[in-house]
Amino acid sequence: MTRASIVVEKLGIPTVTLCCDGFKTAGSFTAKGEGYPNLPFATHPGHVNTTPNDEVYKNAVDIMLGQVITGLTVQPKDAKPKKEPGIRDIIFSGTYEDVNDYFLAREWSEGLPIVPPTLEKVDEFMKFTDRKADDVLGILKPDNRQATIWSVAVNGVMSGCRPEYMPILVAITEALCDPNFTQENLGHTPATEVMTILSGSLVKDLNFNCTQGALRPGFQANTSIGRFWRMYLRNVCGYLPHKTDKGCYGDNFRIVLAENDDYLEQIGWEPYRVDRGFEKADNVITVMSCTERTQGIEVGWPTAEGILTAIEKRMAENHMFIQFFFRGQRMKPLVILTPTIVDSLVREGYTKEAVKEHFCKGAKFRLCNLSNRLAERFVTGVEQGNWPELIGSKESYGDFKVNADGKLEFYDENGNLTDMGENRMIQMMAAPEDFQLIVSGDPARDHVIIGAQNGFIGRPTSKKVELPEKWEELRRNKR
Amino acid sequence: MSNTNQYEVVWPATPSTTQGAKLAKRLDTLEGKVVAELWDWVFKGDIMFEAFRAELPKRYPGIKLISWEEFGEIHGANEYEVLAALPQKFKEMGVDAVICGVGC
């Protein structure tokens, strides 16, 4: 909302922004990042979701109305510009402990020790890119700061990366800056965490783990680059808990997921980078929102059908952010399969496309499992005519509503309650190609991971990793 | 220069591009003004706007509120397009002020 208000303020039209009172701080910090720290708000006491509708109305009249009038008629003070350091300026000097304390006090680290970003260290990273230090990859919200190549190197140093990871860090930052990814939404309440996926020969060249424990800390490339993502969101985007990062619970940064290329080559499936429209010879980084992650334990079965249907049932348990589907959007969930699982599918002739096709048809949701706001969003989605062929239409359901306890109720033409959706199934996905299917993890086990993707927030966004001209020489010198 | 004990370090952030912005001039009164409603279509904004539509004209005769339905969902898959269309719509409608919600 704050972003929309800023757009309007820039037109010279005064605004007042409505929010629940627990969101004013986040709104004010977002406004500050836009250069408007004194943007006016009108706040509802408590959260509207837990407040009956007639009370929301009363609060709007008794509490918010006065704030709306003040916001539109009383001129707030303008912000004063602040001087900021240049890229090679030394901002602090001290011991390892001093530097860590200094950075922590300014919210420039997440609490784990950082590697001090000295000029020597950062320059070492800069050798691994042909880009200039002041090249700008984009402007990042909420703080509206420039995503410079130099800042990528500084935060890479701090996160414990090796200099040779620099081309991957640059590609990740390019993906972050891509408007398709909508990074401006990452401070929202579901606390979207992102999965970063590497597909290509760099997995082996830089010692990424793509087998057992693929998402476990313990492998420098996977772990430190995962940490870099959150470090960059903190220091350049400006996403800070209790300020602009309004994640209800939040989550840890994700370990980078590396694809098992050797196995794919062995079975003749194309790698993920080809699914994303790149050449097989490329190295490709993909970032995508991956908020709710479900591990389906022991989906293995002697038949492919048994395996696929087991995975689809876990998809329903994950919900896969179905509320966005009700709003007419497409979700692009992540599915990670182990080689053991894929072996069983390939044995019966399944291609990657056929697996996705099966998932698309088989991922179904039972309506009685919707409740409260999710149930309301289903009703609104049906009323708005979103995906009628997949979630049903007003005509097909007849009379239905959400009851006082947040459950769905369906009625016959005489107004009698018939059911609460116990046997009503809807589709969860719009198209097979929306599944992001990766082969990784323990080749000896039959678990699967399903990662929900938040619709328009954090769409899968891929970038080719551009290696510097002297890559081989630089790598030789590092060995 | 760094030695084994001392580290001279650089800034991890980058220059802000939004320094020195100014808020729009506030109105002297809402009487006779055109106020647009912008909504993200969640968190009961429809109820809040219903209340404002009922109450504001009692205090400010001639005020006109333009419904959120005229502008589309301001936070969603079509956010960029909806926001990009606002200047032209506001111009055509003669909008003087905006109430925008709901952040929750």
Image (cartoon, coloured by chain):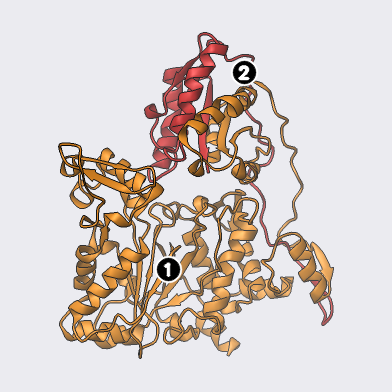
Q: What x and y, as percent, mark residue A231?
A: 61, 65
* Quarter of image, res A342: bottom left
Query: Identity of the amino acid at label 1?
Result: Arg
The answer to whether residue A447 is visible is yes
* Quarter of image, res A377: top left
Q: Answer above or below: position of B89 versus A294.
A: above
Residue wearing tag 1: A293
The chain under label 1 reads A
Secondary structure under the numbered disc 2 in the rendered image: loop
The chain under label 2 reads B
Tell me what residue is drawn at x 51 percent, y 23 percent.
B52
The colour of chain A is: orange
* Quarter of image, res A131: bottom right
Q: Quick one: which chain is red?
A: B
Residue wearing tag 2: B27
Q: What x and y, as percent, mark residue A67?
A: 63, 27
Query: Identity of the amino acid at label 2?
Result: Leu
How many badges with numbers are in the image? 2
**Of residues A144 and B38, which is closer to you in this image?**
B38
Q: How far apart are marks 1 and 2 (CA)?
A: 49 Å
Q: What x and y, as percent, mark residue A65?
A: 58, 24
Tell me what residue is drawn at x 44 percent, y 75 percent.
A257
Determine whether, in the image, residue A100 is placed left or right of residue B37: right
Determine whether, in the image, residue A377 is placed left or right of residue A476: left
Q: Answer above or below: position of A60 versus A32.
A: above
Tell me what residue is drawn at x 67 percent, y 58 percent.
B13
